[in-house]
Image: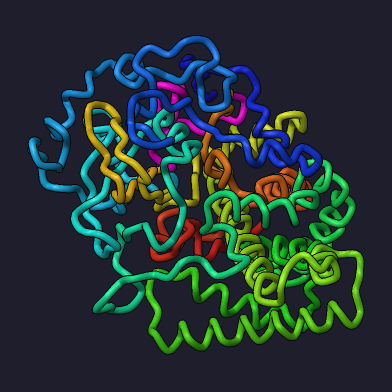
């Protein structure tokens, strides 16, 4: 029997159900995060990201009070080795930490996060490459993560953010350009919302619910193919990978003959290491395939998102290609890893798997708990400070890179009473598996739609499904941008 959570719970988080209703366009432009007050020179005046004494309704969404980090963790911020004003003139700092990467369990984040979250919630972080000089900051508590990700004083622009990990190939200089037209993921307002509005309608919960018959059909066809492959079988190759790819491609309108070349080269860009030549080849092939697809959509439009974008006259050819690239890049990789890693976790926890089989009403919460517990965006979410901001007595200077450790935030005991336990009956509201704020994953409802259908269908089809190898022999995707498993051999 799993241990019930006894920590803080919140009212239902409306973001979980629908964050981007296209008819409410004002919501996309409304500043989020705590109200900025003070006597600074501009609109981004210095102020704590998380108020020390919050009043009612002052949380990132105005729905609940944020956790007071010092009180919730039973420790004063002064325990952090950073003193004075942090790693700035007038203060001293301990040596910056490396981004934690070493795991002792396939399902748990690196153990180093727990100590940082308790004693040094804003830790100096070693960056491997600029832009800018010096080191960055690593934030590990949930309340701080949600506040930073919903605060426009922290930018998602690629050209401002330093790297906490080595680049995929050696570089003598790191000066990334601004995001190309249409590459909205790496843009701030107002450009980010302008592009996001163009696709939002298809990705709302209502839009994804309309795709339930299609997702169900593809799920059953994928299970047929997996069964036909014979046992033992690699669940990644025969189920977890092809299912979300087919769903995304049918929604967007990507034909079969294009899926292979796109998938292969998008997968290369998800690796931690590749050569400059491989990068050039991958980008060239992806761009050529998408340009050809754009021409086809204009010649023979269909009822799909990419045809709609091509015919609307609201984007240039370059913008269309980059929007399609962003959607396919995210849709091909993330849901696949959650489906495979979640299956691995459930197969090693029979009581949780039995609950999913016996209580179908738990499926939605099970998906949320797996998202929280596993957090496949294992390197976090990076931002750049657009102004000086103080957090826990540490000054984050304008231009500093801040890495929000999503796996650490989703294991915060101040919010989740037993965060290191997988419990599909426990409250899950407030997790940041899909990020938070304006840049929260646009495809989150698509991922949920696939997972809530695929998990039960898999275990109905194969009620005796089990691992065909020892758990410690399952190869992990620690070398990829998104965590998961490279292969999961199963039998029944």
- Is 361 placed left or right of 3 in the picture? right
Q: Is residue 53 magenta?
A: no
- Is 121 placed left or right of 238 in the picture? left
* Residue bounds of the magenta highlight: 406-426
Query: Does residue 233 appear in this view?
Result: no
Judge whether 394 appears above or below 216 on screen. above
The residue shown at (50%, 57%) is 484
Give how far across and how far down residue 270 sits, in percent: 49, 68
The residue shown at (25%, 36%) is 116
Looking at this view, is 404 or 357 the one in front? 404
Query: Does residue 68 appear in this view?
Result: yes
Looking at this view, is 249 or 43 the one in front? 43
- Is 242 placed left or right of 308 in the picture? left
Q: Is residue 418 magenta?
A: yes
Q: Quadrant of the N terminus?
A: top right
The residue shown at (46%, 20%) is 66
The residue shown at (85%, 70%) is 311
């Amino acid at each position: 029997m799993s241990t019930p959570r006894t920590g803080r719970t919140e009212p239902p988080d409306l973001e979980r159900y629908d964050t981007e209703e296209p008819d409410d366009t004002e919501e996309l432009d409304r500043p989020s995060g705590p109200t900025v007050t003070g006597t600074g020179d501009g609109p981004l005046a210095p102020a704590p990201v998380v108020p020390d004494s919050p009043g009612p309704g002052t949380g990132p969404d105005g729905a609940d009070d944020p956790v007071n980090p010092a009180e919730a963790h039973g420790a004063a911020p002064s325990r952090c080795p950073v003193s004075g004003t942090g790693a700035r003139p007038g203060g001293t700092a301990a040596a910056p930490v490396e981004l934690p990467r070493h795991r002792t369990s396939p399902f748990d984040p690196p153990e180093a996060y727990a100590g940082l979250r308790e004693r040094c919630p804003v830790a100096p972080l070693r960056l491997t490459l600029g832009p800018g000089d010096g080191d960055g900051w690593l934030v590990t508590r949930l309340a701080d993560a949600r506040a930073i990700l919903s605060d426009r004083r922290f930018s998602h622009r690629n050209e401002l953010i330093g790297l906490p990990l080595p680049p995929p190939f050696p570089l003598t200089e790191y000066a990334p350009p601004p995001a190309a037209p249409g590459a909205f993921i790496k843009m701030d307002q107002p450009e980010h919302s302008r592009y996001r509005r163009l696709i939002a309608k298809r990705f709302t919960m209502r839009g994804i619910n309309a795709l339930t018959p299609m997702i169900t059909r593809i799920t059953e066809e994928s299970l047929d193919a997996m069964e036909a492959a014979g046992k033992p079988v690699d669940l990644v190759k025969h189920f977890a990978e092809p299912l979300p790819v087919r769903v995304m491609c049918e929604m967007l309108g990507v034909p079969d003959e294009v899926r292979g070349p796109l998938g292969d080269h998008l997968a290369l860009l998800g690796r931690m290491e590749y050569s400059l030549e491989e990068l050039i080849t991958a980008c060239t092939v992806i761009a050529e395939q998408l340009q050809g697809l754009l021409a086809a959509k204009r010649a023979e439009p269909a009822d799909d998102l990419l045809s709609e974008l091509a015919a609307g006259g609201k984007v240039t050819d370059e913008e269309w290609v980059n929007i399609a690239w962003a959607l396919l890049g995210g849709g091909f990789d993330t849901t696949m890893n959650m489906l495979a890693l979640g299956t691995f976790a459930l197969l090693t926890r029979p009581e949780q798997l039995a609950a999913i089989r016996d209580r179908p009403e738990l499926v939605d919460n099970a998906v949320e708990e797996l998202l929280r517990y596993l957090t496949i965006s294992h390197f976090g979410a990076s931002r750049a400070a657009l102004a000086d901001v103080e957090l826990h007595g540490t000054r984050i200077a304008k231009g500093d890179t801040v890495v929000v450790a999503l796996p650490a935030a989703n294991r915060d005991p101040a919010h989740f009473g037993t965060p290191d336990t997988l419990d599909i009956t426990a409250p899950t509201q407030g997790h940041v598996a899909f990020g938070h704020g304006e840049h929260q994953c646009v495809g989150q409802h698509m991922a949920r739609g696939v997972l809530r259908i695929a998990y039960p269908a898999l275990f109905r089809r194969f009620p005796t499904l089990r691992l065909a190898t020892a758990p410690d022999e399952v190869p992990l995707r620690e070398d990829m941008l998104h965590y998961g498993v490279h292969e999961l051999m199963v039998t029944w």
